[in-house]
Image (spheres, rainbow, N blue to C red):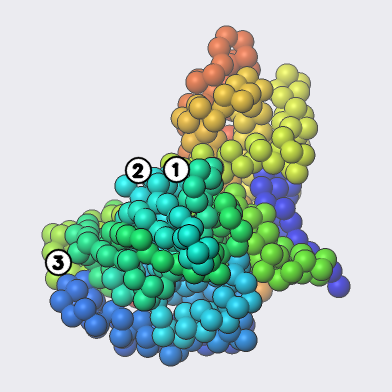
C-alpha cells in the first residue's frame, strides 16, 4: 500500500482529515519507553546539577553528561544502526528533542550535536565519511559543532569570508577565517565548517577534526541564558583539511546549510516543548503552595486565566509540531517507495515541508517566551530570584527566537517559499485566490451549519480564515509582484496569518482525532483549548490582515477587501473565561500540565 503524503503549504488551500494527522496519543510503547528513558536521564543527570552546569566551574561536567547521553543511545536516535545509532523514525527524534527541551542549557548542547553537527555527514557524506565519523558521534565518543556564522555573516550566511585554499601538492585545503557563536566548540572534536574556495559564489562544506591543528578559540562567551552550553569564537589559521574531507560537492555548502537548518527549525519547535510543560507544571505547583489573603493564589481568576492560557498554547504547539513531523516522515516514506535514495528522500521530505518547519520554529519559540514570562509573573517576587526555577527558564528561553534563523527571517522565508512554489506551479494558490477575489463582489451565501457535529462550526471558520490569506496574499502578490519581498512588514503580516491558520487547524484536528479515541467527555478540556485558541487566532488574523490591506490598497479596492475581511473573520463568541477556568481547575487538580 502506497504511503499517503501531502505537500507542504497545502493546508492553506485544502481541508485535512483528522485521521490523516499524527497526534502524541499515538506514540508506540517503544517510543514511550525511549521518552521515559530520556526523562529519567534528565531527572537524574541534569536537573539536580542545573546550577553547577550553568556555572561552568567544572569543565568536565557537561562533557561527562554528554557521554552518558551517548551511552544511553540518545545521541544516535536517527543515525542508522550500521553506523552505531538506533535508526529510529523522524517523529521519534522529534519526541526525544521534545523531552530534552526540559534540560535547560543541555538542550542546546544536545541539539547542536545531534542536529547541525551530525546530520550534514549523515545526509551528505560519502560512505567512507559516514563509517569514519558517525559511530563516534552516535555514541558520544566525539562531540560535534557547526561553524557557519561569522562576525559579518549571520542571516546572510552565504556572505561568509572564511577561505579554503588548495595546497600546492593538491592534498589539503588550508582554512583561514573566523566563526562565532559556535555551540559545543569548547569540547568538540569535530567541526562542520563552511568556507569559500577562491572566488566561488557559494560556500563549500568541510569535515574538520580538532586534531588537524590550526584551530584556536576565544574564552567562553558570557551569555544572557543557556550559560551551561559551550559557546565560543573559533579561528582557523592555515588549518589543514584533507581533500577527502570536503563534504559533498564544491559550492554545495549553502544548500547543505539551508537543508540542515530546515531540520533544525522543526526540531527546535519540538525542542522547546519539554521546557514549556515543565514551566507550566512548576507554575501550577507554586500557585497551589503560595497563599495570599488566606487562600492559594490559584483560586483567583487572574491566575487561572494565566495557567489555562499557558496550557492552551502548549497543547496547540504540540499539535502542530507532531503534525508537521509525521507529514515529513510520510513524505520520506513515499519518496523511498518511489525508489529515491534514503538520505536524499530524507532531505527532500524535510524540504517539502520547509514552510511548516519555519512555522513550528516561530510558533513554538514564541510560545516558550510567553509561558516563561507568565511563569515569572505567577511566581511574583520569587520569579525574579535565582533560587527559584523561573529565573533561569526566563533567560534560557530568549535564544530560541534567534537561533536557527531569527523569527523575522523565518516569517519572511515561509511566505517567500510559498510564493516561489506557486510561481513554479508546485502549489496552486493563485486559482483559489482568484476565486476568493470573485467572491468578494458576489452576494454572500448563508449556509446552515450542522452544529451537532463536533467542530463543524470551527471548521467553517477555518475555511474562511484561509480565504483571508488567499485574499490578502493574492492581492499583494498581484499588486507588488517581484517587489513583494522588499515589503517585509507585509510579508510578516502574511506569515502571522499563515501561522495562526496552521496552529488553529492543528489543534482542532488533534482534538477531533483524540475524541475519536477517547470520547467527547474525556476530551472536554482539549475541546476547550482548541476553541480558545481559534477564538484568539481570529482576532490576530484580523489585525494582521487589516495592517497588510492598509499597506498596499486604497479607495474602493480597500473598502471591498475590508468588507471581505469582516465577512471572513466572523466567528462564534465563546465564554473563554469559563473555558479557561475549567481548564485551570483540571490542571490544579492534577498538579501539573496534564494534557
In the orientation shown, which residue stands out farthest toward the bottom? 71
Q: Secondary structure at mark 3?
A: loop
Q: As rendered, which of 520 and 78 lies closer to the eye?
A: 78
Q: Dot 1, crowdedness within 10 Å: few (<14), some or many (≥20)?
A: some
Q: Is residue 63 left or right of residue 111?
A: left
Label 3 neighbour load within 10 Å: few <14, some 14-19, many 20+? few
Q: Badge 2 is on which residue? A: 152
Q: Mark 3 vs mark 2: give the one in front.
A: 2
Q: Which mark is residue 277?
A: none
Residue at image position (35%, 43%) is: 152
Q: Are marks 3 and 1 in contact (CB under 8 Å)?
A: no
545, 259: nearer the viewer = 259
In the foreground, 267 or 229: 229
Say if mark 1 contacts mark 2, CB within 8 Å.
yes
Residue 232 image position (x, y, % from top left): 27, 62
Q: How many marks?
A: 3
Residue with the mark numbered 3: 386
Find the distance from the CA under tag 3 to the CA under tag 2. 35 Å
* Pointer 1 residue: 159
Which comes sooner in the sequence, label 3 or label 2? 2
Residue furthest front in the image? 169
Amino acid at each position: 500500500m502506497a504511503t499517503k503524503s501531502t505537500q507542504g503549504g497545502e493546508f492553506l488551500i485544502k481541508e485535512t482529515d483528522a485521521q490523516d494527522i499524527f497526534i502524541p496519543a499515538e506514540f508506540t510503547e517503544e517510543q514511550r519507553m525511549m521518552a521515559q528513558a530520556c526523562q529519567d536521564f534528565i531527572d537524574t543527570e541534569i536537573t539536580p546539577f542545573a546550577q553547577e552546569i550553568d556555572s561552568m566551574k567544572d569543565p568536565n561536567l557537561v562533557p561527562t553528561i554528554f557521554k552518558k547521553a551517548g551511552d544511553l543511545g540518545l545521541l544516535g536516535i536517527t543515525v542508522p544502526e550500521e553506523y552505531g545509532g538506533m535508526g529510529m523514525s523522524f517523529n521519534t527524534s522529534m519526541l526525544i528533542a521534545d523531552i530534552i527541551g526540559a534540560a535547560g542549557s543541555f538542550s542546546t548542547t544536545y541539539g547542536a550535536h545531534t542536529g547541525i553537527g551530525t546530520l550534514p555527514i549523515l545526509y551528505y557524506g560519502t560512505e567512507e565519511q559516514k563509517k569514519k565519523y558517525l559511530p563516534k558521534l552516535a555514541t558520544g565518543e566525539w562531540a560535534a559543532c557547526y561553524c557557519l556564522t561569522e562576525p559579518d555573516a549571520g542571516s546572510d550566511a552565504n556572505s561568509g569570508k572564511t577561505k579554503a585554499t588548495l595546497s600546492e601538492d593538491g592534498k589539503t585545503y588550508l582554512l583561514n577565517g573566523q566563526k562565532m557563536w559556535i555551540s559545543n566548540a569548547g569540547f568538540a572534536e569535530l567541526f562542520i565548517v563552511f568556507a569559500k574556495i577562491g572566488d566561488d559564489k557559494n560556500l563549500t562544506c568541510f569535515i574538520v577534526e580538532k586534531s588537524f591543528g590550526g584551530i584556536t578559540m576565544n574564552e567562553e562567551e558570557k551569555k544572557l541564558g543557556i550559560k551551561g552550553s559551550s559557546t565560543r569564537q573559533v579561528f582557523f589559521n592555515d588549518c589543514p583539511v584533507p581533500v577527502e574531507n570536503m563534504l559533498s560537492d564544491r559550492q554545495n555548502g549553502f544548500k547543505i546549510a539551508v537543508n540542515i537548518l530546515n531540520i533544525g527549525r522543526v526540531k527546535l519547535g519540538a525542542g522547546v516543548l519539554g521546557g514549556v510543560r515543565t514551566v507550566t507544571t512548576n507554575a501550577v505547583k507554586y500557585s497551589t503552595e503560595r497563599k495570599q489573603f488566606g487562600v492559594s493564589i490559584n483560586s483567583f481568576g487572574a491566575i487561572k486565566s494565566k495557567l489555562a492560557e499557558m496550557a492552551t498554547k502548549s497543547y496547540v504547539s504540540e499539535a502542530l509540531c507532531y503534525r508537521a513531523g509525521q507529514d515529513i516522515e510520510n513524505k520520506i516514506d513515499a519518496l523511498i517507495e518511489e525508489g529515491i535514495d534514503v538520505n536524499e528522500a530524507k532531505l527532500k521530505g524535510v524540504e517539502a515541508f520547509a514552510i511548516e518547519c519555519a512555522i513550528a520554529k516561530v510558533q513554538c519559540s514564541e510560545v516558550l517566551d510567553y509561558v516563561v514570562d507568565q511563569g515569572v509573573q505567577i511566581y511574583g517576587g520569587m520569579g525574579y530570584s535565582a533560587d527559584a526555577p523561573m529565573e533561569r527558564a526566563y533567560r534560557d528561553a530568549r535564544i530560541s527566537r534567534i537561533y536557527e534563523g531569527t523569527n523575522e527571517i523565518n516569517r519572511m522565508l515561509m511566505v517567500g517559499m510559498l510564493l516561489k512554489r506557486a510561481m513554479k506551479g508546485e502549489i496552486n494558490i493563485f486559482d483559489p485566490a482568484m476565486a476568493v477575489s470573485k467572491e468578494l463582489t458576489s452576494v454572500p451565501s448563508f449556509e446552515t451549519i450542522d452544529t451537532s457535529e463536533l467542530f463543524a462550526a470551527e471548521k467553517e471558520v477555518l475555511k474562511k480564515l484561509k480565504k483571508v490569506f488567499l485574499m490578502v496574499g493574492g492581492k499583494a502578490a498581484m499588486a507588488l509582484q517581484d517587489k513583494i519581498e522588499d515589503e517585509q512588514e507585509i510579508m510578516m503580516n502574511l506569515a502571522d496569518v499563515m501561522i495562526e491558520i496552521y496552529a488553529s487547524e492543528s489543534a482542532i484536528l488533534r482534538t477531533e482525532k483524540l475524541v475519536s479515541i477517547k470520547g467527547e467527555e474525556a476530551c472536554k478540556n482539549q475541546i476547550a483549548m482548541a476553541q480558545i485558541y481559534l477564538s484568539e487566532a481570529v482576532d490576530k488574523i484580523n489585525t494582521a490582515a487589516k495592517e497588510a490591506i492598509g499597506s498596499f490598497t486604497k479607495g474602493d479596492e480597500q473598502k471591498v477587501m475590508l468588507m471581505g475581511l469582516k465577512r471572513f473573520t466572523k466567528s462564534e463568541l465563546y465564554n473563554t473565561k469559563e473555558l479557561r477556568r475549567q481548564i485551570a481547575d483540571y490542571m490544579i487538580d492534577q498538579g501539573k500540565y496534564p494534557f
